[in-house]
Every structure is written in C-alpha cells, then in structure tokens.
Image (tube, rainbow, N blue to C red):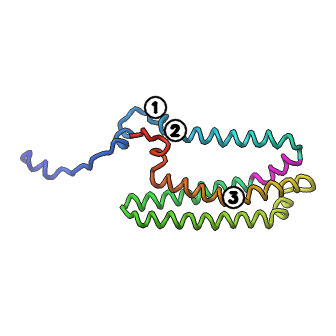
Amino acid sequence: MPEAATDILAPVQPAMSPRTRLLLHGPILPTLLRLAWPNTLVMLAQASVGLIETWWVSHLGNDALAGIALVFPGFMMMTMLSGGAMGGGIASAIARALGGGRQADADALVLHALVINGLLGLGFAALFIGFGPAIYAAMGGEAGSLAAALQYSDVVYAGGLLVWLGNALASVLRGCAAAATWCCPRWP
C-alpha cells in the first residue's frame, strides 16, 4: 500500500493537554508529590484537630471524654456519608456531565447536590438532637457521660449542615477537576 494511503487510514490523535502529558510521561515521584501535598496537608490538619480537641477535653474530666466517645461514631458516619458516599456520587455525576460536554446538566447537578446534602444535614441534626438521649443511652451513656454527650452533640449537629454543604462543594470541585488547579495554580 502506498504511504499516502496509510496516512489517510491512520486514526487522528487529539492534541494532549500539558497536564495529561505530564501525568502519562513525566517523572513519577515529583508528579506524585505535587499531587499529594494538598491532601497530605488536609489530613495533617484533620488529625491535629482531633488530637488537640481530645487534649483540650481531657482537662474537663472523664465524663467529657466519654461524652465525646459517644458522639464520635455518629459524627464520623455523617462525615463519611457526606464526603465519601454522597460526595463520590456528586463528583462522578459532575465529571461525567462535563466530560460529555453537558455544562447545563453539570450546573443542575450542583444545585441538586446542595439541596439534597442540605436536607440530609438537617435530617442528621434533627435525628441526633431530637433522639440523642435515647441513642447515647443505648450506646451505654449514663449520668455525667450522657449529659456531656448531649451538650457536645447539640453543638456538633447544630453545625452539621455546614459539614454536609462543605463536603458537597468539595465534591463539586473534585468532579470539575478543579481541585488540582485551585490548590496548585502553577500546575500545568
């Protein structure tokens, strides 16, 4: 077959963005470090907050520590549901809409994600503020530890709506692939 005929039959390769080229062909370790440092800082900050909060509460006594231990599983469940389960769905749906060139669908998904996560945040607040005494008593809370759990729980879940909305917005950024460009503006 003549050379001109093979050129016609060859598939046309779309131009590769510099970011994609770096991910596929760049040096592995520097690329991983550049991508990992924002997540590493967030994880360090979250672990530090947990340790500092525990240290601070330890000065209030055993009942206060036991109260936090009663609230912690529900709060972690809320965090994992809002950031992981719902957040993964939000990021995936928005990424698929944007990848398919459907900007209007992606915009609608953002609005729906905020509404749904807002309702779930209010639902969690109502559940744990309304039924907190029964929930924490069933978990073994009594007397001082139950009272401390209820005080802590009321504050935590009163702000739970912000956790749900914050995780929804973080998931929107992940779905838009904007996290790397926002955290690393010099990223190609």
Mark 3 neighbour density, 10 Å: few (under 14) some (14–19) many (20 or more): many
The residue tagged with tag 2: helix, strand or loop? helix
Q: CA distance from mark 2 to mark 3?
A: 28 Å
The residue carrying mark 3 is: 160
Q: Which tag, 1 or 3, sits closer to the chain's start?
A: 1
- Report the span colored magenta: 63-72
Seen at 44% across and 57% down, the residue is 95
Question: Where residue 47 sits: x, y (%)?
Answer: 68, 40
The residue tagged with tag 1: helix, strand or loop? helix
The residue carrying mark 1 is: 29
Q: Which tag, 1 or 2, sits closer to the chain's start?
A: 1
Q: CA distance from mark 1 to mark 3?
A: 38 Å
The label on residue 36 is 2
Q: Marks 3 and 1: in contact by CB < 8 Å?
A: no
The residue tagged with tag 3: helix, strand or loop? helix
Kind of residue at disc 1: Leu
Q: Is residue 154 left or right of residue 124?
A: right
Quick check: is 9 in the magenta stretch? no
Question: Where residue 93 sits: x, y (%)?
Answer: 47, 61
Q: Nearer the viewer, mark 1 or mark 3?
A: 3
Kind of residue at disc 3: Gly
Q: Quadrant of the C terminus?
A: top left
Q: Which tag, 2 or 3, sits closer to the chain's start?
A: 2
Quick check: is 66 in the magenta stretch? yes
Seen at 49% across and 34% down, the residue is 33
Kind of residue at disc 2: Ala
Q: Is residue 78 left or right of residue 23?
A: right
Residue 127, placed above or below residue 72: below
Seen at 76% across and 43% down, the residue is 53
The quarter of the displayed image where residue 167 is located: bottom right
